[in-house]
Amino acid sequence: MKFRRTLIGSLVLLVLIVGISVFAQVNRPYRNGTVWNIAFIRMKPGMETAYLNYLAGQWKTNQEAAKKEGIILSYKVLGVEGHSPGEWNLMLMTEYKDLATMEANEDKADALAQKMVGNDEKQMQGYKDRSEIREVMGDRLAREIVLRTKK
């Protein structure tokens, strides 16, 4: 009976050791990259130029200031073809180093917006004015997956 217990105990220990060594050898074929905040916008019919003027002006100025302050890494505007009248046709993408940095810089970003755009009342009026030329269809946070070369 004692031999049987010793044998079972030895087998369990062996399985654990093998399992741990196999787990330690597992390499993820990727690493986490930067984080993107993506807004999906539908420019209202006939208002494309008006909204793109806003993006090329105040929005771009704010993004460049945030980039200079180290709040964001980069930004992009992507136009897409809509397949139906109610679909989004523009993506506004803002890149952050990671989620922790994005969250840690919220107060700094708010202060920058106050400086660049104005007080809360002025910012809310801007949102209201833009709602006449575009509709925000939604937004997402996405993490870039950087693939590694498999060995």
Image: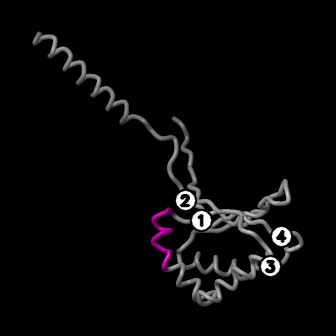
Q: Are marks 4 and 2 in contact (CB under 8 Å)?
A: no
In the rendered image, residue 106 lying in the magenta stretch gets the answer yes
Element on which disc 2 rests:
strand
Residue 53 disc label: 3
Please name the residue that numbered disc 1 is placed on: 95
Q: Are marks 1 and 2 in contact (CB under 8 Å)?
A: yes
Q: Position of residue 67 (x, y in %)?
A: 59, 75
Question: Which region of the structure is painted magenta?
Answer: 98-107
* CA neighbours of label 3 inside 10 A, class few (<14), some (14 to 19), many (20+): few
Taking the image as drawn, is residue 94 in sight?
yes
Element on which disc 4 rests:
loop
Between discs 4 and 1, the one toward the N terminus: 4
Between discs 3 and 1, the one toward the N terminus: 3
Please name the residue that numbered disc 2 is placed on: 34
Can you tell which quarter of the image residue 140 is in? bottom right
Three-letter amino acid code at disc 3?
Answer: Asn
Taking the image as drawn, is residue 52 in sight?
no
Can you tell which quarter of the image residue 8 is in? top left
Q: Are marks 3 and 4 in contact (CB under 8 Å)?
A: no
Three-letter amino acid code at disc 1?
Answer: Glu
> What residue sits 64% from the left and 76% below the top?
63
Between discs 4 and 2, the one toward the N terminus: 2
Between discs 3 and 4, the one toward the N terminus: 4
| Looking at the image, residue 134 lies above or below residue 129 | above
